[in-house]
Each structure stands twice: as structure tokens, then as C-alpha cells.
Amino acid sequence: MLREPFLFSMNTAILLAIIVAYFALLLGIAFYTSRGSDNESFFIGNRNSKWWLVAFGMIGTSLSGMTFISVPGTVGKGGFGYFQVVTGYWLGYFVVAGVLLPLYYRMQLTSIYTYLERRLGVNAYRTGALFFILSRTLGATIRLYLVIKVLQTFVLGGIGIPFGVTAFIILGLILLYTYRGGVKTIVWTDTLQTTFMLLALVICVGWIMHALHLSPAGTWAALTEKGYTQTWQTDINSSGFFLKQILGGAFITIAMTGLDQEMMQKNISVSNIKDAQKNMIVFCFVMVIANFIFLLLGGLLYLYAGANGITVAGDDLFPTVAVNSGLPFFITICFMIGLISAVFPSADGALTALTSSFCIDILGIKKNAALTEERRKKIRFTVHNVFAFIFLLCMFFFKAIDNGSLIDILLKMAGFTYGPLLGLFAFGILTRRNVASRIPMVVCLASMVLTFAIDFVNNAAWYAGKFHLSAAGTEWLNNLSQNIFHGYHIGVELLIVNAFITFILLYVLAVKSTNNNENERSVEQPAHA
């Protein structure tokens, strides 16, 4: 459990003032960047974003509050094992830069799911968009919930503000600064927020090393002595086996970055393919470094907690040490600034991308010539507000199921919801076959259900704990899992399993294409950069 909330009235007032000032700065940037904006500014930033701004801002989007809070907490149990997944992320970014970005630029896409329409038909197009909407809504709200929980526990709850009010106000503020500018605004606000987040991370690492009287070499030695630097898992049956983690990480990147409208919306706002690829490559190297520093911070936090008699782990570790462990108030301020800087790049971009995808892919407002620009803008505003309300509902759902460590739930949800997207795109790019009009949606839903059934049996103990199954039910599930999988545990490669099932079902139900149209051939065979 989290410790007592931070109750010092003067310090609480200072923290509140900092949060208000931070939002005022975001609103000022939004006002400046949204001048003269239109629907194209909202959707793709008029395709004139600077690649280096996009690359830097995307770091904040990818890291998010989940990384800021949960990744340091994983070190106590798994050492630096998460770096195996990060290695996979790094490999996946090269696939995105070399295969997917050239495809999107050649087709001049606003929504990347338009590729599925041209290749496999309208049903595939809408299926891809709907699975993105489901995936990004769940992913963004679980990240947002985690940060709001920390703010609520350590600052706002202590002065009597309920969780619902906190969530409502923060969502309202995000709406305010994304309402008009969309991507055109977010490219700049994300850059600002990434700067603050990384500065807070480095300052916290430096100060804790100073408090423990450790040099860089001494830090590594102390972490190694405690076993925190252990990285590579060689037990093939373990869910943390290094090949599973690397492959899973690579495909997570391909799906959650390359096939994600939010992430690609920023990339395709850059004016040309070469700059977009530079953005992706620079971004992937900085991401590896940033994640390593978060793991280093996690080890230092455990060392500090052990030296000061603090018994806390998981998602509670960083907030408790930063706020209630006797560190200088300056560190608490850095933590809070880093925390709110971590949450908004993932939430604001998701809200904008979901609005864009629903308006373009589901409602088809760009294809409807009868709609005036003003009418399109009104539809966009309405959709934007509806998604903000859905975010609010989802946060209450995650509050109800919160078990103290949410990063495992996030990766599992990604496996269920991004897997069909990966399978759809893989089928379109790697084969020349077509499917009947209603097949894609049916296949993707069936694949998600089958994947859940496989994972439910494979990870019987995990689900038994989540659903509070009886002892008899738990024993039966464990025996079934042992008989089928013989001790093999599925980890982050769940997404690959889901995508493979989707691909195979589509292939079995498909027919050979008889369309030799040059446009289709160019879509099916993207040039590699």
C-alpha cells in the first residue's frame, strides 16, 4: 500500500501552484500554435512538423507515466530484465522506419488504416481502425489513471479532493489545449513535457546517488551486489526468457508504434520520408538510453529504501521515496513535474489520434463532400468530447481492478488488442491474397477470443488470482496448463501468438487476388528504405 499522503500545507500549496503554472504554460503554447489552424492542422499538422521535434516529443509519448512509475518498481523483482524487452523495441523501430513509413508516405495517408481499405476492402479498414480505437483507449487511460492515482494519493487527496474530481479536471485541461490545434499543438507540447520528464529523471538519479554517497562505479557495484543488474533470463520455459522478451518487444514496437495512428500521426506530419526516418532512428536510440536510466533509478530507489528502512515495492516505490522518505522537498518538486510531464504526452496524443481515427475512418468526414469545413469541425469537437468522457469511465474501471502493479496488465492488453492489427497488416503486406468483405472483422474477433483462451489456460495462476477462483478451480486450471504447455509460460510474445492466429485464419479463408492493378501491386510491395 502507498504510505500516508503528503500533508504539509505549505508544501502542498507549492505543489498545487506548480501544477497550475504548468497547465498555464501548456495552454499558452496551445493558444500560440493553434492560430489559423484547421482540420488538416488537427489531423496531420499540415505536414510541416520538424522531424527533430517529433522525435524528441515521441519519447514522452512512448515512456508515459507507466514507465515513470512502474519500470523502476520492476527492478526489485526482476532486476534489469525489462531491458530485454527494450532491446526488442530497438529492433522493431528499424522495421517501422524501413518498411512501414515508406508505405505510408508513398500512399500519402492521413489515417494509416486507409492502407487496409485499398488492399483488403472497407471492412478491413474499419476493423483496423476499431481495434486501434480499442487498444489506444485502454492503453492511454491505464497510463493516465496511474499518474492521477499518485497525484491523488500524495497531493490532492490530502486536501479533500475526490479522485473523480481530479480525473475530471485533468481531462478538462487536456481537452482545452488539444481542442483546436491537435497534432500541430501536440508536437510542441510533447517536446516541452519530454524535456521536463527527462530532466526530472536525471536529477532524481543524481541526487539519490549523492544521498547514498555513491560514484557511478560504486553505484553499479552496489546494484550488482544486490542482484539488481541481472538482465538476461535463460530459462526457456520462463515468461522472461530473453528470446521471448526480445521478439515480443520487437513486435510490440511494430504494432504499438508502426500500426498505431497516434504514433504515426506525428511521424506523417513531417514533410518528407527521409526526415521521418531520421526521426524514428534518433528516437529509438534515445528511448533505449532513457529506459536504461529508469532501470538504474529503480535500483537506486531500492538501495535507498533498504538503507532507510522503507518497505515498499512495485508502483508504490518511486512516489513513496520521492515524497515521504525525508529527501529534500526539491526532489519532491522534480518528481511531481516529471510525473505530470509523463502523463500528458500519452493522454493528449491519444485523445487527438482517437478523434482523428473515428472522424476519418469510422465517420468518413474527409470523404463526404457534402460536409462543409465548419460542419467537419463541429463533428470533430463532438467526437473529441465523447472520447474524453470515455477516458473518464475507463479510469474508474482501472481504479476498480488496480492491484498495485499495472505494467503487466498494460502489456497483456496490448497482446489481445494489437495482435489482430499486426496480423491484418502482415497479411496485406506479405501475401497477394484477398478475403471476402466481412471476413476481417470476424477473424480479428475470433483471434482475440482464441488468444484469451490460450493465455487463460497458460497463465492459470495469474487469472485465478485476478478472478478470485476457488482452490479447486485453481488446481484444475493449473493441472490443465501443465498438461497442455508442460511448464512453458507465455509472456510478451502473446501479441505474436495473436497476430499469427489472425494471419493463419485470414490465409485459410482467403482467395488468390486476380487484380493486377498497378496501384494494388505498389501497395502490396512497399519499398524498403
Image (cartoon, rainbow, N blue to C red):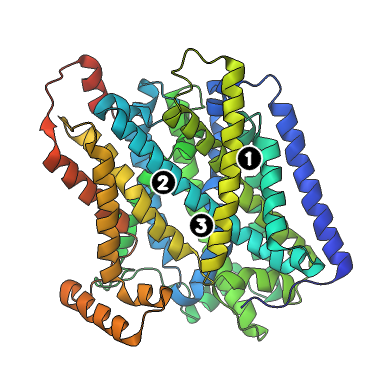
Residue 225 vs 250, above or below: the answer is below
Residue drawn at (33%, 64%), measured in percent from left and top? 491
Q: Amino acid at mark 2?
A: Met
The quadrant of the rendering that contains the C terminus is top left
Categorize mark 3 by other alpha carbons within 10 Å: few (<14), some (14-19), many (20+).
some
Residue 199 disc label = none
The quadrant of the rendering that contains the N terminus is bottom right
Q: Amino acid at mark 1?
A: Thr
> x, y percentage for residue 515?
15, 19
> Which element is circle 1 on?
helix
Quarter of the image where one finds residue 422: top left
Between 175 and 50, the one nearer to me in the picture: 175
Cβ–Cβ below 8 Å for labels 1 and 3? no
Q: Is residue 20 visible?
A: yes
Q: How many marks?
A: 3
Q: Is residue 56 visible?
A: no
Residue 291 disc label = 3
- Which of the marked residues, 2 or 3, is nearer the chain's N terminus? 2
Between 400 and 503, the one nearer to me in the picture: 400
Residue 256 disc label = 2
- Which of the marked residues, 1 or 3, is nearer the chain's N terminus? 1
Residue 191 disc label = 1
Categorize mark 2 by other alpha carbons within 10 Å: few (<14), some (14-19), many (20+).
many
- Mark 2, mark 3: which one is toward the viewer? 2
Residue 429 vs 152, above or below: the answer is above
> x, y percentage for residue 379?
57, 27
- Which of the marked residues, 1 or 2, is nearer the chain's N terminus? 1
